[in-house]
Image (spheres, rainbow, N blue to C red):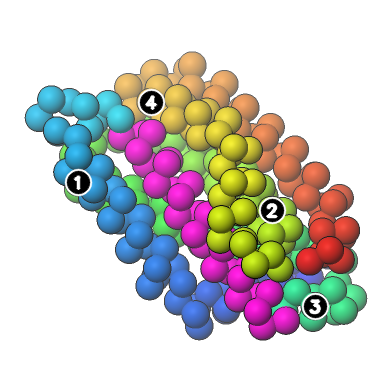
Amino acid sequence: MIRDILLIAGKDLRIEGRSRIGVAQVLPFALLVLLLFAFALDPDRGVLQAATPGLFWVTVLFASVLALQRNFGIEAEDGIIDALRLSGIAPASIYLGKVLALIVQLAALELVLVAAVAVFYNTDFHGVPLLVAIAAATTVGIAATGSIYGALAARLRSRDTILPLLILPLLAPVLISATRGSEVALRGEAGTGWSWAALLGLFAGAYLVVGAVLFSPLLEDA
């Protein structure tokens, strides 16, 4: 199973490397959103720094939806979903492999965005262990949820509009928890922030289980 998961993840990452969706589309979009927030909010009044956690995770969430749309769109157009269904690999392994590949892509995106936040927003980072835990749990939660609904909407003609409508309401609790936990960490009050990290971990774990169980019928419908 681990070999199959790594095989699927490697396949998705090779597709990303050849299509350059992340580098050519998702990353510039995310950086532009952060930059526009910096222009829209006055840094001299402290509003920008206070809103930094929320702005960061909103940007990550929007960029994740864009990445999901393009990744699953390419697979649907090129018949990769049909090939996966006929490959003999367990649907749970396919799902977890896709989640792993998306985690790698999102983690790389977040590292670049953290550097951009430090430059654009002049942010001082405190509570780094808590921030790392929150980022890890949030990334897994987004990837686990997005891989389910990305497969569900892949063959729809209106997937570019349907996918955001499906995924954004479900990820609202993740956005809120990640923002609150990051605010606590940046204030240097790590103690109360671990409860937010635990909540994010529960959400991620629940969706990983649900996705592994339900991906077989989703793959057939796709």
Please report the residue visible at 29 percent of the width from the left and 48 percent of the height from the top.
Answer: 34
Secondary structure category for the residue under label 2: helix
First in sequence, mark 2 or 1: give its number: 1
What residue does disc 2 label?
A: 149
What residue does disc 4 label?
A: 183
Residue type indicated by callout 2:
Tyr
Please report the residue visible at 42 percent of the width from the left and 41 percent of the height from the top.
Answer: 58
Please report the residue visible at 72 percent of the width from the left and 81 percent of the height from the top.
Answer: 79
Secondary structure category for the residue under label 4: helix
- Magenta region: 52-79
First in sequence, mark 3 or 1: give its number: 3
First in sequence, mark 3 or 4: give its number: 3
Q: How far is the residue under mark 3 from the one under mark 4?
A: 44 Å
Image quarter in which the C terminus is found: bottom right
Within-10-Å neighbours for mark 3: few <14, some 14–19, many 20+: some
Q: How far is the residue under mark 3 from the one under mark 1?
A: 44 Å
